[in-house]
Each structure stands twice: as structure tokens, then as C-alpha cells.
Amino acid sequence: MTEKFHTPKPDDRSDNVDKLQNMIHDTIENIEAAHETMQFASGEEKQNIIEKNKRREEAIEGFRSEIKDEVREEQ
């Protein structure tokens, strides 16, 4: 029986900054959409939206930190 060896794909990080910027953009859009939804939400739903948006803002901070790391590695 012939064994096939799988070689890992090379680590292509050339477009990581673009991907992270798109993720930030999408997350901001989600925050804005949630704010619009909040005006029609009940008390508990509003609280859930507020908490989720807080997590989204934390994610954006993480994305921005990753962008800084990527830029440093490129230099």
C-alpha cells in the first residue's frame, strides 16, 4: 500500500491585515445594526444587545492589536 504524505500549506499571511480590517468593518456594521434594533427591543433584549456590543467592541480592540502585530512583523 502506498502511503500519501500530506504536506502542510505554506503560511501565507500576506493578506492578514486586509482580512482583519474587513472583520473590523463588519463588526462595526453589526454594532450599528444592533443599535437600530435596540429601539424596538424589550428591557432584557436591550441588555443582551448592550452586552453583545461590548464584546464586539472588545473584539475590535483585539483585531486592531493583531493589525499592529502584523505590521511590526512585516518591517
Image: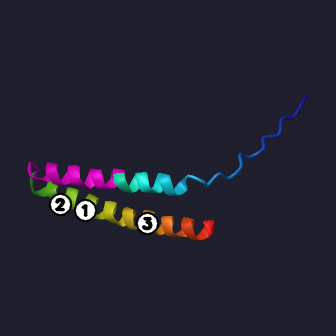
Q: Earlier in the sequence, mark 2 or mark 3?
A: 2
* Labels 2 & 1 near each other (Cβ < 8 A): yes
Q: Looking at the image, which is closer to me, 45 or 64?
A: 64
The residue pinned by badge 2 equals 47
Residue 22 pos. (x, y %) = 42, 51
Q: Is residue 5 magenta?
A: no
Query: In this picture, which residue range is highlighted in magenta?
Result: 26-41
Tag 1: amino acid: Glu
Up/down of 41 relative to 58, above or below: above
Q: Residue furthest top?
A: 1
Task: Please report the residue visible at 33 percent of the width from the left and 60 percent of the height from the top.
Answer: 56
Identify the image quadrant of residue 7.
top right
Task: Please report the residue visible at 50 percent of the width from the left and 69 percent of the height from the top.
Answer: 68
The residue tagged with tag 2: helix, strand or loop?
Answer: helix
Tag 3: amino acid: Arg
The residue pinned by badge 3 equals 64
Which mark, by number, is residue 51? 1
Task: Please report the residue visible at 78 percent of the width from the left and 41 percent of the height from the top.
Answer: 6
Secondary structure character of the magenta stretch overall: helix
| Mark pair 2, 3: CA separation | 26 Å
